[in-house]
Image (cartoon, coloured by chain):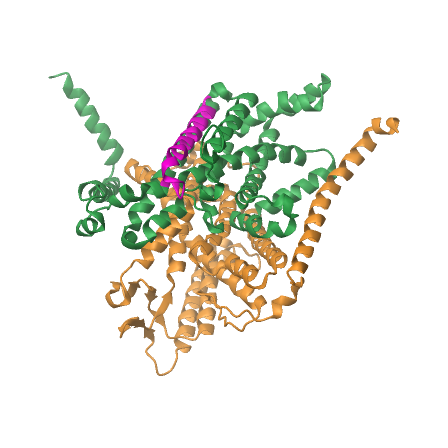
Chain colours: A orange, B green
């Protein structure tokens, strides 16, 4: 017996069995206990509840949801809301971050100072505090009667009203797809090998493709207009409320503003780090070859910096997507809030938490996969980032 | 007089070189200066010049003034800082906050950077904090956890998260590095799945779901369950930082200690961990900063920490218009803690980089 214990392999095997067994005991014990508690509360476990109707309404959704829709549809709506908020927040945070990062790496010391104050200010205050502040700010705007007017938009305590085209949703979607394609197609055109022409001579082709798609997008919008109504719907005061245009809820705008400002500070630091990672030698070589500052920036520093910052940027994006769950603090019906309400209303605690975990795992893994793909596609051969 | 001229001229020319090299640079400098000046002046005017400081006039005096209404803070600072803690006992809450600050400052001094000293400081500090807040001993009145609030609760959650989370992180990191495949795989799975979830959902799960899964004698108070959740989350992130630090230790160190016949525990605690922690120190401080900011999330599961008590301070009755001042005050409290810690981290990073080069 003791001789067996002295054998390293046997000891290792026993240790591993103990460890895995202990973890399994905790998990299974918790599961059994939960089953027992739920049975006492007369809640049948299983995913059957997904097809029952909910009976409540979300306050914001980009897909339509009614109280008699089933639970699974509400989960889909929640994920769509999370993704929509995430995309809007990430895009604007990236724009702000790029501006801040460029300011911090510029040669102008005044700009550097400005960027630094921005980063220090917004990064050192918790995001949830900023969300609360902006929510209070947006809901303390004047009532619709005295709403602020800003370039045709109306800012009121009931939300932000922006003018929109009077166009069917499906046409808008199609035209948005065209717009994205117009941006992405030139990249593909310059890289693909299917066109028997060297990449330098494809500029005209790219231009034609982009402009064509842009024209197509505007054509679709014009074709999809709702007959009998003005083409552009502008918010206007009627009685005590605003009519026309589209309403952006205060919760959504508060979250987008907070995520933009907070994320912008972090992304700004990542952008700065990316530019710092570009070797001095590369920049000096560019200058000594007689490249203008703009050429050195756009041909040498930017491409190298992009490659250096992409992996960190991917982490930051995943973090920001997770941060959208803060919506629950101010009542934005994102994925997490739907899960929380489901637990409250139906008592299907374990299933709902399981769905939550699966949903976030899916979002995070797909984001990570996309970034890995991009990272691999643009990676340089060899080790050119260090000089 | 003549000696002054070259210096002044030099200063002028260096100023010109730095800010006005080309017309574009000059325009950029002036525009940023203008923006900065306007913002600074507006903020100063709002916060100091046309602000109301005393609480005597009440909300009416504030509404008449253009600037900030600091009288809401003068009237409600006790709620923001101490929450629902009994009025006569609030000095205990204040003293507890001071203890935490002293503890953090002490553990920033390099003289205290041995495992034993750090552990002693933190365990002693948390014990003192807990005894002082809860009372029931040495003639102090008993105050249950449900009455804790404000800054003291925020600090308590932060400190106990770190005290539980840090040893846990080291355990997780060592388990993940284990040579036994099943141990490292299972630990890796646990760490990765925690890291892929938002902290709010973990806090929510520990507050709401875990009571279903534990027998009633194990459940404990909601506050401690949430602290365990936060500690687990902290540990999952910190474990990866420690693992990174361990990977940075040259392989020869471990091999040499094995060749000398040093046992596992000695090898880990005397040779690998001290070097690994040195590598991981900047990232660790960063993680502390992040987790301090994230303590504010417990508001979602219904705790009365500084942000929630701030919401309560302006949310009721006459002060509803003064939300900006309340949030600015709370933001200032957070800023002081977070900014000084992160500056310290940056200083340390520079300082240690000198040693290694």
A30 versus A196 height, above or below: above
Q: Position of residue B8 (x, y in %)?
A: 17, 23
| Viewer-closest of A370 and B108 | B108
B314 versus A52 height, above or below: above
Res A72 → quadrant = bottom right
Asked whether residue B356 appears in the rendered view, the answer is yes
Extreme-left residue of the structure: B1
Extreme-front residue of the structure: B139
Please state the extent of the stretch shown in magenta in the rendering.
B81-109
Position of residue B163 in the picture relative to residue B140 (left or right):
right
Q: Main secondary structure of the magenta part?
A: helix
Q: Position of residue B9 (x, y in %)?
A: 17, 24
Asked whether residue A278 appears in the rendered view, the answer is no
| Viewer-closest of B82 and B140 | B140
B255 versus B219 height, above or below: above
B168 versus A48 height, above or below: above
Position of residue A334 in the picture relative to residue B313 (left or right):
right
């Amino acid at each position: 017996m003791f001789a067996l214990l002295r054998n390293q392999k046997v000891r290792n095997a026993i240790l591993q069995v103990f460890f895995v067994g202990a973890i399994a005991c905790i998990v299974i014990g918790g599961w059994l206990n939960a089953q027992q508690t739920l049975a006492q509360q007369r809640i049948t476990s299983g995913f059957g509840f997904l097809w029952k109707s909910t009976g409540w309404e979300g306050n914001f959704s980009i897909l339509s949801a009614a109280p008699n829709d089933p639970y699974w549809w509400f989960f889909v709506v929640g994920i769509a809301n999370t993704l929509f908020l995430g995309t809007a927040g990430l895009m604007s945070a990236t724009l702000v971050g790029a501006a801040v990062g460029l300011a911090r790496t510029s040669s102008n010391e005044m700009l550097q100072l400005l960027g630094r104050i921005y980063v220090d200010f917004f990064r050192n205050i918790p995001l949830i505090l900023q969300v609360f502040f902006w929510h209070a700010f947006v809901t303390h705007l004047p009532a619709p009667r005295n709403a602020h007017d800003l370039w045709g938009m109306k800012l009121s305590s009931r939300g932000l009203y922006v003018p929109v085209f009077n166009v069917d949703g499906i046409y808008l979607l199609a035209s948005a797809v065209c717009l994205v394609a117009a941006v992405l197609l030139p990249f593909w055109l310059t890289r693909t090998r299917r066109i028997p022409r060297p990449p330098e001579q494809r500029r005209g082709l790219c231009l034609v493709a982009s402009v064509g798609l842009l024209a197509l997008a505007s054509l679709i919008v014009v074709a999809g207009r709702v007959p009998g109504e003005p083409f552009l719907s502008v918010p206007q005061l009627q009685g005590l409320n605003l009519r026309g245009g589209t309403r952006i809820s205060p919760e959504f705008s508060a979250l987008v503003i907070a995520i933009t400002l907070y994320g912008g500070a972090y992304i700004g630091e990542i952008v700065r780090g990316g530019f710092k990672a570009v070797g001095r030698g590369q920049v000096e070589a560019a200058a000594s070859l007689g490249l203008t500052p703009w050429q050195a920036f756009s041909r040498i520093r930017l491409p190298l910096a992009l490659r250096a910052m992409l992996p960190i940027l991917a982490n930051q994006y995943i973090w920001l997507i997770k941060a959208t769950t803060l919506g629950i603090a101010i009542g934005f019906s994102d994925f997490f809030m739907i899960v929380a309400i489901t637990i409250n209303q139906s008592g299907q605690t374990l299933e709902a938490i399981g769905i939550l975990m699966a949903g976030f795992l899916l979002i995070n893994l797909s984001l990570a996969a996309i970034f890995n793909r991009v990272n691999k596609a643009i990676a340089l051969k060899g080790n050119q980032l260090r000089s | 007089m003549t000696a002054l001229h070259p210096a002044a001229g030099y200063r002028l020319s260096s100023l010109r070189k730095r800010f006005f090299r080309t017309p574009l640079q000059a325009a950029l400098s002036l525009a940023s200066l203008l923006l900065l000046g306007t913002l600074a002046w507006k903020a100063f005017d709002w916060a100091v010049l046309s602000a109301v400081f005393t609480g005597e006039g009440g909300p009416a005096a504030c509404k008449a003034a253009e600037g900030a209404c600091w009288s809401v803070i003068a009237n409600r600072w006790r709620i923001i800082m101490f929450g629902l803690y009994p009025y006569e006992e609030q000095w205990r809450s204040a003293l507890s906050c001071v203890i935490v600050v002293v503890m953090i400052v002490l553990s920033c001094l390099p003289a205290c950077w041995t495992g034993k000293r750090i552990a002693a400081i933190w365990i002693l500090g948390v014990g003192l904090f807990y005894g002082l807040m809860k009372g029931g001993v040495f003639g102090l009145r008993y105050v249950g956890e449900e009455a804790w609030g404000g800054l003291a609760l925020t600090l308590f959650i932060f400190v106990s998260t770190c005290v539980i989370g840090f040893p846990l992180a080291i355990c997780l990191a060592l388990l993940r590095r284990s040579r036994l495949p099943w141990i490292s795989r299972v630990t890796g799975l646990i760490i990765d799945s925690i890291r892929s979830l938002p902290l709010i959902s973990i806090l929510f799960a520990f507050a709401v779901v875990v009571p279903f899964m534990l027998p009633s004698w194990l459940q404990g108070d909601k506050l401690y369950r949430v602290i365990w959740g936060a500690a687990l989350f902290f540990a999952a992130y910190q474990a990866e930082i420690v693992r990174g630090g361990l990977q940075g230790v040259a392989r020869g160190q471990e091999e040499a200690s094995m060749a000398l016949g040093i046992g596992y525990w000695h090898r880990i605690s005397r040779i690998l961990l001290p070097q690994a922690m040195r590598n991981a120190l900047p990232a660790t401080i960063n993680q502390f900063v992040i987790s301090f900011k994230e303590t504010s999330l417990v508001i979602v599961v219904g705790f009365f920490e500084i942000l929630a008590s701030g919401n309560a301070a302006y949310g009721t009755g006459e002060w509803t218009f003064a939300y900006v001042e309340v949030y600015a005050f709370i933001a200032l409290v957070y800023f002081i803690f977070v900014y000084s810690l992160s500056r310290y981290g940056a200083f340390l990073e520079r300082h240690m980089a000198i040693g290694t080069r």
